Image (cartoon, helix red, strand yellow):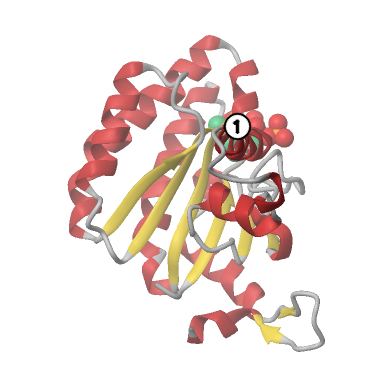
């Protein structure tokens, strides 16, 4: 697969709810509609890998009722969307910690991973209980274990080796989109974003649709990427493969 990898920091559910005079959790419900539409539209926009930031390791700081709702929505999403995801050739995988995800949500998530494993049109990565610092430390820990077991020598611990351990061969994101007018990474894909382009949208996530993603991609297509060299690659250049 040689299309684009887009990462999205889905932000603004709480503000959307407040604007509509609704409790915060209703914003997360609206956020699921945005996820559904963006996932449906992504392949036609040339996206082959889509990483959605759904729950950060720091989101545990929120009230337990809100956290509970978010994992309930994850479970519902997996249950309800699984068949459509399979029909549309979407392969779902999760990145992040699994040991703290409530059991019923984790069961649905892992079932979705197995049942969608044959999907070839779009790789949908859900970042759940994910933090880039955790992910990097986890990858470093795996390499340290291999050194301790003498399967690796310290000199083998290079950026390329750590990259492979961390990403498992998933290409780096070409574009990172953040909604709700915030301009920060909030611990999302810190390593992988080394040469990513950024697009900040003021749209609140529950209002975000595939047309907004198309807009982000046309902005991206105008970027000139150099990767440290003097050669210029147009943002959309990667689309040609
Ligand atoms: C994004 O919306 C969803 C998650 C982080 C889980 P927020 O809940 O952060 O919405 P705001 O930032 O409060 O508007
Ligand atoms: C980032 O959004 C995490 C997700 C979108 C899942 P936050 O709303 O948690 O980020 P901060 O706290 O504003 O940086
Ligand atoms: Mg937020």
> Toward the viewer: 204 or 64?
64
Q: Is residue 114 left or right of residue 151?
A: left
As displayed, is residue 107 above or below residue 115?
Answer: above
State which quarter of the image contains the N terminus: bottom left
Check disc 1 and report the residue beneath it: 148
> Toward the viewer: 233 or 143?
143
Q: Element under label 1?
A: helix
Q: Image quadrant of residue 88?
A: bottom left
Q: Image quadrant of residue 120?
A: bottom left
x%, y% of residue 146? 55, 38
> Toward the viewer: 61 or 49?
49
Rendered residue at 74%/75% (across/down): 227
Rendered residue at 32%/34% (across/down): 109
* Residue 199 visible in this rendered orientation of the protein: yes
Q: Tell me how many marks there are.
A: 1
Q: Crowding near pointer 1: few (<14 within 10 Å), some, many (20+)? A: few
Q: Give the residue at the far front of this rendering.
A: 150
As displayed, is residue 186 above or below residue 227?
Answer: above
Q: Is residue 86 left or right of residue 188?
A: left
Rendered residue at 45%/25% (across/down): 70
x%, y% of residue 99? 45, 20
x%, y% of residue 211? 49, 66
Rendered residue at 48%/53% (across/down): 168
Q: Is residue 192 left or right of residue 35?
A: right
* Residue 19 visible in this rendered orientation of the protein: no
x%, y% of residue 144? 63, 35
């Amino acid at each position: 697969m040689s299309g684009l990898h887009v990462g999205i920091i889905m932000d603004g559910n709480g503000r959307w709810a407040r604007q509509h005079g609704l409790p915060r959790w209703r914003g997360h419900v609206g956020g699921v509609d945005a996820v559904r539409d963006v996932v449906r539209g992504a392949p036609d926009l040339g996206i082959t890998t889509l990483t959605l930031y759904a729950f950060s390791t720091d989101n545990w700081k929120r009230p337990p009722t809100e956290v509970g709702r978010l994992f309930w929505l994850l479970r519902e999403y997996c249950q309800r969307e699984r068949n459509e995801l399979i029909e549309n050739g979407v392969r779902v995988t999760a990145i992040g910690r699994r040991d703290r995800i409530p059991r019923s949500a984790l069961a649905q998530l892992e079932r979705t991973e197995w049942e969608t494993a044959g999907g070839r049109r779009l790789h949908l990565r859900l970042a759940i209980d994910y933090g880039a610092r955790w992910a990097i430390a986890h990858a470093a820990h795996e390499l340290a274990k291999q050194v301790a077991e003498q399967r690796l020598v310290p000199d083998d611990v290079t950026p390329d080796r750590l990259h492979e351990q961390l990403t498992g061969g998933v290409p780096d994101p070409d574009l990172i989109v953040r909604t709700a007018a915030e301009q920060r990474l909030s611990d999302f894909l810190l390593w992988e974003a080394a040469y990513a382009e950024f697009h900040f949208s003021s749209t609140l996530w529950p209002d975000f649709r595939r047309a907004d993603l198309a807009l982000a991609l046309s902005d991206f297509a105008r970027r000139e990427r150099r990767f440290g060299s003097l050669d210029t690659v147009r943002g959309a250049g990667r689309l040609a493969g």
